[in-house]
Image: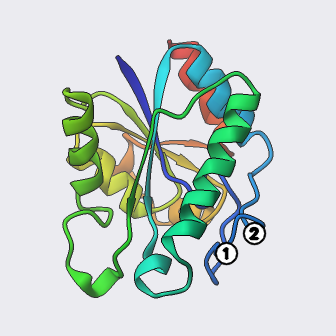
């Protein structure tokens, strides 16, 4: 099975410094839903791995988060694709959990669920946390310039030659599909 692992906020949907708190605030970045559907139709299993500290901060409840994820999945399904799984960390940064990216807990859980290693998979994100997680799990790091991606790209140096950079998820998906 071939996997593409996606961060959520800033990669799939528009991010906000005030957190995405409701399904109404959850708005896809242009082209992202179509990109996910295209990857899925091409045979990739799509996994979303996302930090959602707004839960731990009490800014929204589990019901709101699940409604946002239903909205995401329905939009992808309307375009003939499918999201295989969504893994999220509900903890705040100072909680010291094992699942908040760049810790590997979310992908460890995915590996247990799927019964295989995610090594060699593509991981698309917009932050250094995503890049660090990709490296920790031997995945190919892809940075998109949406969300926090422009700020993150400014921090890349010569030691980051393994990071491929694309304007957005749609452009990254074209490259992933071309590589097969």
The residue identified by callout 1 is: 16
How far is mark 1 from mark 2, CA to CA?
9 Å
- Residue 133 against residue 150 in the figure, above or below: above
Image position, residue 42 (x, y; %): 57, 13
Given contact means CB atoms under 8 Å apart, are the residues at marks 1 and 2 in contact?
yes
Residue visible at 33% across and 63% down in the picture = 101
Image position, residue 75 (x, y; %): 73, 39
Q: Secondary structure at mark 1?
A: loop
| Residue 42, label in figure | none
Q: Is residue 168 left or right of residue 3?
A: right
Residue visible at 20% across and 79% down in the picture = 96
Give whichever of 24, 148 is nearer the camera.
24
Give whichever of 11, 73 is nearer the camera.
73
Q: Earlier in the sequence, mark 1 or mark 2?
A: 1
Q: Residue 174, can we see it?
A: no
- Residue 169 against residue 120 in the figure, above or below: below
The residue identified by callout 2 is: 25
Looking at the image, how many numbered discs can be counted on the residues?
2
Q: Residue 167's image quarter?
A: top right
Is label 1 or label 2 in front?
2
Q: Is residue 118 left or right of residue 37?
A: left
Residue visible at 46% across and 32% down in the picture = 84
Q: Residue 95, can we see it?
A: yes
């Amino acid at each position: 099975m071939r996997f593409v692992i996606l961060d959520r906020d800033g990669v799939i949907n528009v991010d906000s410094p005030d957190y995405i708190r409701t399904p109404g605030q959850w708005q896809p970045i242009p082209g992202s839903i179509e990109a996910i559907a295209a990857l899925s139709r091409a045979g990739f299993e799509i996994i979303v791995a996302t930090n959602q500290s707004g839960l731990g901060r009490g800014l929204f409840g589990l019901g709101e988060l699940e409604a946002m994820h239903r909205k995401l999945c329905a939009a992808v399904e309307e375009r003939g694709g499918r999201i295989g799984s969504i893994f999220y960390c509900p903890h705040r940064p100072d909680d010291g959990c094992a699942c908040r990216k760049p810790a590997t807990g979310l992908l460890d859980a995915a590996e247990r669920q799927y019964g295989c290693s995610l090594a060699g998979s593509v991981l698309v994100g917009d932050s250094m946390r995503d890049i660090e997680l990709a490296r920790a799990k031997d995945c190919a790091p892809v940075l998109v310039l949406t969300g926090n991606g422009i700020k993150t790209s400014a921090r890349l140096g010569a030691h980051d030659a393994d990071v491929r950079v694309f304007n957005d998820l749609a452009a990254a998906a074209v490259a992933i599909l071309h590589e097969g």
